[in-house]
């Protein structure tokens, strides 16, 4: 029996809740999966992976022009050197925002996302609305999400795939030159690395 | 800001700042965890799974609004998982149907 702790009763055999429970139990009985490993994996994805990993990379790039150059040049090499690894970061490209250029990331077909740098994607990233609309009318979607861009700024939309994942390097907020790595990293939100927000001001 | 506070603003903590729950129900984390374990143990790759996920999402998107359930990403995920398990002969569809029907018929309070 599933070790799920949900006490809601779902009685439709076609519901994903019932099918998931049945599927998990059958795979356990066949010895194909191991419940302890499944739980450890869920915990790892919930707790160990998250935007703090990407935020540190961004803060480092702000602090060091040399690190920034390497990151934009060959992110894979930098991630290997930093000991960051994960199933979903086969190939990462970092796109830097600069005056007049704003980058935003989407996966139009499903939900490809740099898990090892940002954790699992938020619900809105996976929604049909965001996936369809940010390509068609990025400026309007960003506006609705609270990010107004200059009218003459160019918006570049990057469509993720199983081969390439993207991370946005947001611009460093003004007046933060005196901050250290941890302080800078705390200004870098997940949304700013997807490109739907700016880095916060301290 | 401490590491804990940074984590608090992340995706897994209760919604605050720009954080939001990734899994809205326990079954969503289970379907994800089962898939991750199957990938870790080499049953299939994330790329193989992604093909089925795209198909499942595409099927939902191309169904008339009146005929489809409300959008649920992890429902599509579970469909993709069922599909790949069936394709690889790891889990027979009929066997899964039989078990799901049995679980759905459990009297309340006897399903744990």
Image (cartoon, coloured by chain):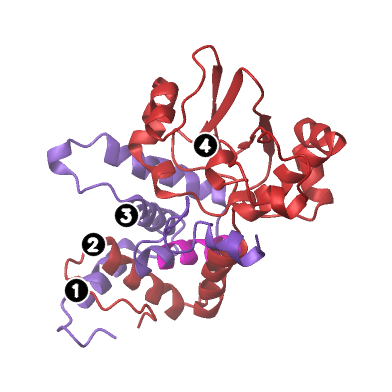
Chain colours: A red, B purple
- Residues at circles 3 and 1 in contact by the CB criterion of under 8 Å: no
Alpha carbons under labels 1 and 4: distance apart: 44 Å
Could you tell me which chain the residue with mark 4 belongs to? A
Q: Quadrant of residue A95?
A: top right
Could you tell me which chain the residue with mark 1 belongs to? B
Residue A166, x across and y down, in percent: 61, 36
Alpha carbons under labels 3 and 2: distance apart: 8 Å
Relative placement, left or right, of A93 versus A24 is: right
Q: Which mark lies nearer to you, 3 or 1?
A: 3
- Give the magenta range: B30-40
Report the quarter where the C terminus of chain B lies.
bottom left
Q: Nearer the viewer, residue A49 or A100?
A: A100
Relative placement, left or right, of A73 versus A125 is: right
Mark 4 sits on what residue?
A197
Residue A33, x across and y down, in percent: 51, 73
Could you tell me which chain the residue with mark 2 belongs to? A
The secondary structure making up most of the magenta span is helix
The residue under the point 20% across, 66% down is A13
Q: Quadrant of residue A201?
A: top right
Residue A56, x across and y down, in percent: 71, 50
Q: Kindly state the secondary structure of the residue where label 3 is placed.
A: helix
- Residues at circles 3 and 2 in contact by the CB criterion of under 8 Å: no
Mark 1 sits on what residue?
B104
Mark 2 sits on what residue?
A15
Let me know if residue B37 is in the magenta part.
yes
Whether labels 3 and 4 share one chain: no
Residue B34, x across and y down, in percent: 47, 66
Mark 3 sits on what residue?
B75
- Residues at circles 1 and 2 in contact by the CB criterion of under 8 Å: yes
């Amino acid at each position: 029996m599933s070790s799920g702790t949900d006490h809601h009763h779902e009685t439709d055999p076609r519901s994903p809740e019932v099918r998931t429970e049945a599927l998990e139990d059958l795979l356990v009985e066949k010895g194909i999966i191991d419940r302890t490993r499944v739980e450890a994996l869920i915990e790892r994805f919930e707790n160990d992976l998250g935007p703090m990993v990407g935020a540190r990379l961004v803060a480092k790039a702000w602090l060091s022009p040399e690190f920034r150059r390497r990151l934009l040049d060959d992110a894979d090499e930098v991630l290997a050197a930093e000991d960051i690894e994960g199933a979903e970061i086969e190939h990462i490209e970092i796109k830097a925002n600069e005056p007049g250029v704003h980058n935003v990331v989407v996966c139009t077909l499903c939900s490809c996302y740099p898990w090892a740098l940002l954790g699992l994607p938020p619900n809105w990233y996976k929604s049909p609305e965001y996936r369809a609309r940010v390509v068609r009318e990025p400026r309007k979607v960003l506006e609705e999400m609270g990010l107004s861009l200059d009218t003459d700024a160019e918006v570049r939309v990057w469509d993720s795939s199983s081969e390439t994942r993207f991370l946005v390097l947001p611009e460093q907020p003004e007046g933060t030159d005196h901050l250290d790595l941890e302080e800078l990293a705390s200004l870098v939100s997940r949304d700013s690395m997807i490109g739907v927000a700016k880095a916060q001001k301290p | 800001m401490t590491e804990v506070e940074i984590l608090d603003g992340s995706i897994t903590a209760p919604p605050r700042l720009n954080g939001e729950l990734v899994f809205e129900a326990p079954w969503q984390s289970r379907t994800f965890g089962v898939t991750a374990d199957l990938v870790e143990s080499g049953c299939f790759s994330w790329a193989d799974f992604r093909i089925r996920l795209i198909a499942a999402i595409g099927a939902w998107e191309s169904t008339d609004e009146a005929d489809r359930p409300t959008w649920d990403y992890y429902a599509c995920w579970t469909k993709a998982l069922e599909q790949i398990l069936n394709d690889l002969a790891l889990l027979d569809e009929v066997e899964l149907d039989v078990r799901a029907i049995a679980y759905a018929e459990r009297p309340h309070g006897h399903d744990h």
